[in-house]
Image (cartoon, rainbow, N blue to C red):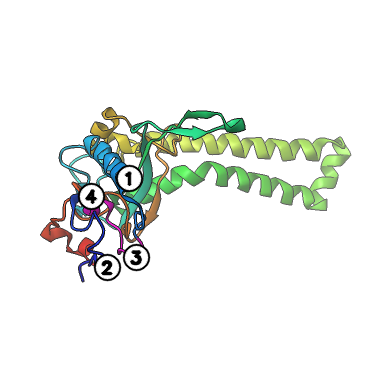
Amino acid sequence: MPRLYTNTDCPLHGSEYCARLHMESCDTCTVRGRDEEEMQLLKQDLDAIAAMMPEEGIAALFLTNECVLCKGEEKGARAWYAQTDIGNAEPRRKQSGFLGIKREARAGSILPIQLACCDACRKRYLMLQYVAPVTAAASIVLGFVLMSIRAIREPLMAITPALPAIVFLVLALGGILGGWLWRGALHKRYGKMTYLSIFRIDTLRRMKRLGWFELYETKDVSRLVFSKKPFRQGLYTGASGHGTADKPAEAAEFAEE
């Protein structure tokens, strides 16, 4: 059933600000109990974020039944939600640093992002995330196991006592280099089929021009987690990416608890 916000005494009740926040209920709302001055500051922050949003909003990134990470005309079916957080320096804030010295915070605003994602794009992201460390770890384990076998270790030691250690290092370094090269080849191939940086998606590309950036940046691939369910609550995670109370008919699942 649709969410019901029962605290009619809340100054945000029924407003666009309430819809933008998209909390599960009044009881779990993070702004509950704030005084009037704090509410005014909150509204100013929400207005600042709204000014940095694309005109069409961001709801289409997760409401669509097609994968938004797929390149080209053929899109996979949505099976997952690829999720991360992005930040913006605005509104400017100060935070305590080393020895209590105030410095400007890197992110004045943080926004959760969720993207409709197909099985194929998820597998590509996971491969790029794990192929190098798993290959390196497997080669190190293999080297350790081989050098633990007496029938292999002792003939090598007969040649020179340091040879088992040298073989182990060669296997370990070979695995690290091999994993890195394998990942590079996969990145080149996958980049033809999948947006490996979320800011190459049209809506997010426009948001980047408005100052948004990835909070968990990696060199060449966005860091994403994948969920079968969309965010239950959070800023701009509701069915309306504009933060209004109107919910499109095709997004009925997001209007339910």
Q: Earlier in the sequence, mark 4 or mark 2?
A: 4
Q: Which residue is mark 4?
A: 17
Q: Which residue is mark 3?
A: 27
Quarter that holds the N terminus: bottom left
Q: Earlier in the sequence, mark 3 or mark 4?
A: 4
Residue type at numbered disc 1: Glu
Residue type at numbered disc 4: Tyr
Q: Which residue is mark 2?
A: 257
Q: Which residue is mark 1?
A: 37
Disc 4 from disc 2: Cα separation: 19 Å
User: Is residue 100 on the magenta stretch?
Assistant: no
**Region rendered in magenta:** 18-28
Main SS of the magenta part reads: loop
- Please report the residue visible at 23 percent of the width from the left and 54 percent of the height from the top: 12
Q: Does any portion of residue 84 appear in the rendered image? A: yes
In this rendered view, identify the residue nearer to me: 40 or 22: 40
